[in-house]
């Protein structure tokens, strides 16, 4: 990672993605110890600024920072001066004035993390902005696939890069509104995978120009060919609206039902970024099958976020080398 | 460490250029054999001895040392490897990334750990290694074996077993490979060849 921020998967490219995954391997080792903590970022402060509700991503970042011995400041919009009418910019500048080294930002509007970089000297990490991107989710998803592929090959150690060439990954669900889909399309294809988007027409982006993907509205026609089925969360607030008339019908046509899971290729992987709604995107019993990587995704999220924090905050301030 | 130095002190596109060979492959093998005997003598055998190589240069030497020890005493000596990137004191001053995943296969509580590195220079890598090791249990004792001690210590650290003491200038580099030990310096890529 050359830049001081992580706003989009496009900032990384294939080499950057592989670098982060290699560092995450080291954090996986650290996590296996009785005291899973290293002193690497002692004295650094990481602030999590979540202007939109999220427990798991915030906890994952905070755990990741603590494993590096960084101090953690937590900011939640609901308990803040935003409620009293403070502007976003004033909030960011106030936190910046307290002296933080990294800001982890989530906001319901696309582009907020990029805007925040203009208001602070801290490194900024996008933890999900509107319908734009969620880069650390894509990194942990790639890492989870790489780990599963390595285990299948019988090489526990996945030291090397990741080559997804020949891998067919289907991203199923509300692609149109999904920042996870956007980051994952970039990441999966950067690593060489073939990506198929599966969604009803109402939930497909109006244009796929320039996207290295195929698209279909028919899940059943592609399911036997997929190596990975990546299910997106259906936002319940959209149900009953014009784009998604009802959840039962969605489950019927796009959910990973028992019947569909039986038609998956042997060894196909099932993933979901969470929070998972059983009975909508996935049948309750399918979510617990061994092919489901959902809990591994959560576990790997901590390793990946530690790696991202270490890459950004441990990077040299100047290009000058000092004596070894 | 030499390899680490070469990779990490190179942002200007500079490369290591050898000037002279100071040990050939046979001399390295003999030094390793002597060090093995010294380790056995000092510890009255190899009970509870664990060999840990420092990434990256110390790891192949540690593997060789374990083979020699096994050869002499006929017992298996546990082998580990340690990457000290997360424990360095120059994080933020220069690019520091782990080279390999640390692999310490057992709790070091009560063990005698022989740390192995190729080159001992400022002592900062060893300082970091001592901290890193402490997270894997409280060793009974830690000893340090290096193929080359090139001087210029910045911390109160000394080796217990040394292949060769080699006086150097600070700006020189020492490179330990399977073929021997070379001394040289960094040069611009264009003038290098």
Image (spheres, coloured by chain):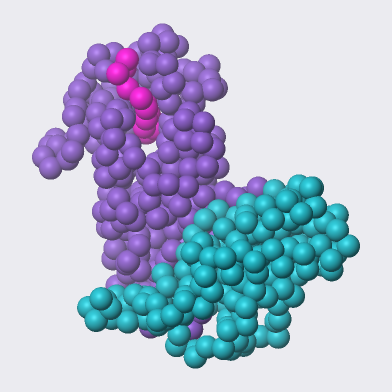
Colour purple, chain: A
Q: Whole-percent x and y of residue A30?
A: 62, 54
Image quadrant holding the C terminus of chain B, namely: bottom left
Q: Nearer the viewer, residue A158 or A203?
A: A158
Where A217 sits versus B157, above or below?
above
Boundaries of the magenta span? A223-236
Q: Taking A239 as reference, is A103 left or right?
A: right
Where B105 sits versus B44, above or below?
above
Q: Taking A125 as reference, is A187 left or right?
A: left
Which residue lies at the image location 73% right of the left edge and 56% below the top edge? Answer: B69
Res. A18 in view: yes
Q: Nearer the viewer, residue A113 or B65?
A: B65
Which residue lies at the image location 32% right of the left edge and 82% below the top edge? Answer: B187
Where A18 sits versus B156, above or below?
above
Which residue lies at the image location 79% right of the left edge and 47% below the top edge? Answer: B75
Q: How many marks?
A: 0
Q: Nearer the viewer, residue A211 or B29?
A: B29
Which residue lies at the image location 70% right of the left edge and 48% below the top edge? Answer: B105
Q: Quadrant of residue A193?
A: top left
Of all residues, the one furthest to the front in this rendering is B26
Per the rendering, the colour in which chain B appears is: cyan
Q: Whole-percent x and y of residue B122?
A: 59, 83
Of all residues, the one furthest to the right in this rendering is B44
Res. B12 in view: no
Where A90 sits versus A109, above or below?
below
């Amino acid at each position: 990672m050359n830049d001081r921020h992580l706003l989009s998967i496009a900032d990384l490219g294939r080499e950057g993605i592989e670098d982060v995954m290699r560092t995450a391997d080291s954090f996986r080792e650290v996590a296996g110890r009785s005291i899973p903590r290293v002193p690497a970022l002692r004295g650094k402060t990481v602030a999590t600024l979540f202007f939109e509700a999220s427990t798991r991503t915030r906890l994952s970042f905070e755990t990741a920072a603590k494993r590096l011995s960084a101090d953690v400041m937590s900011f939640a919009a609901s308990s803040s001066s935003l409620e009293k009418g403070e502007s976003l910019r004033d909030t960011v500048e106030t936190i910046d004035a307290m002296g933080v080294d990294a800001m982890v930002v989530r906001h319901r509007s696309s582009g907020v993390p990029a805007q925040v970089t203009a208001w602070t000297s801290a490194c900024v990490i996008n933890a999900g902005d509107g319908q734009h991107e969620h880069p650390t989710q894509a990194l942990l998803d790639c890492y989870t696939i790489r780990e599963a592929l390595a285990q299948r090959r019988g090489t526990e150690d996945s030291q090397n890069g990741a080559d997804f060439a020949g891998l067919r990954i289907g991203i199923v669900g509300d692609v149109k509104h999904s920042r996870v889909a956007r980051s994952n399309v970039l990441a999966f294809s950067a690593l060489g995978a073939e990506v198929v988007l599966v969604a009803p027409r109402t939930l497909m982006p109006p244009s796929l120009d320039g996207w290295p993907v195929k698209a279909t509205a028919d899940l059943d026609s592609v399911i036997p060919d997929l190596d990975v089925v990546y299910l997106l969360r259906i936002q319940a607030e959209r149900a009953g609206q014009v784009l998604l008339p009802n959840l039962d019908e969605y489950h019927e046509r796009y959910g990973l039902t028992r019947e569909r899971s039986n038609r998956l290729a042997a060894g196909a992987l099932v993933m979901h970024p969470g929070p998972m709604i059983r009975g909508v995107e996935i049948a309750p019993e399918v979510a617990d099958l061994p092919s489901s990587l959902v809990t591994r995704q959560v576990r790997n999220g901590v390793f990946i976020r530690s790696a991202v924090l270490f890459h950004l905050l441990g990077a040299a301030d100047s290009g000058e080398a000092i004596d070894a | 460490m030499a390899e680490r130095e070469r990779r990490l002190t190179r942002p200007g596109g500079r490369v290591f250029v050898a000037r002279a060979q100071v040990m050939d492959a046979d001399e390295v093998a003999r030094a390793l054999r002597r060090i093995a005997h010294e380790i056995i003598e000092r510890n009255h055998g190899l009970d509870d001895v664990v060999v840990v190589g420092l990434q990256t240069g110390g790891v192949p030497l540690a593997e060789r040392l374990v083979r020699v020890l096994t050869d002499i005493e006929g017992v298996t000596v546990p082998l580990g490897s340690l990457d000290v990137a997360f424990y360095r004191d120059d994080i933020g001053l220069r690019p520091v990334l782990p080279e390999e995943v640390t692999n310490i296969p057992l709790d070091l509580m009560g063990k005698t750990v022989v740390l192995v590195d190729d080159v001992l220079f400022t002592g900062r890598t060893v300082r970091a290694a001592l901290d890193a090791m402490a997270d894997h249990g409280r060793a009974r004792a830690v000893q340090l074996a290096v193929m080359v001690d090139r001087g210029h210590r910045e911390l109160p650290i000394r080796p217990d077993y040394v292949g060769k003491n080699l006086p150097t200038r600070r700006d020189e580099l020492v490179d330990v490979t399977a073929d021997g030990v070379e001394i040289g310096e960094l040069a611009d890529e264009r003038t290098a060849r």
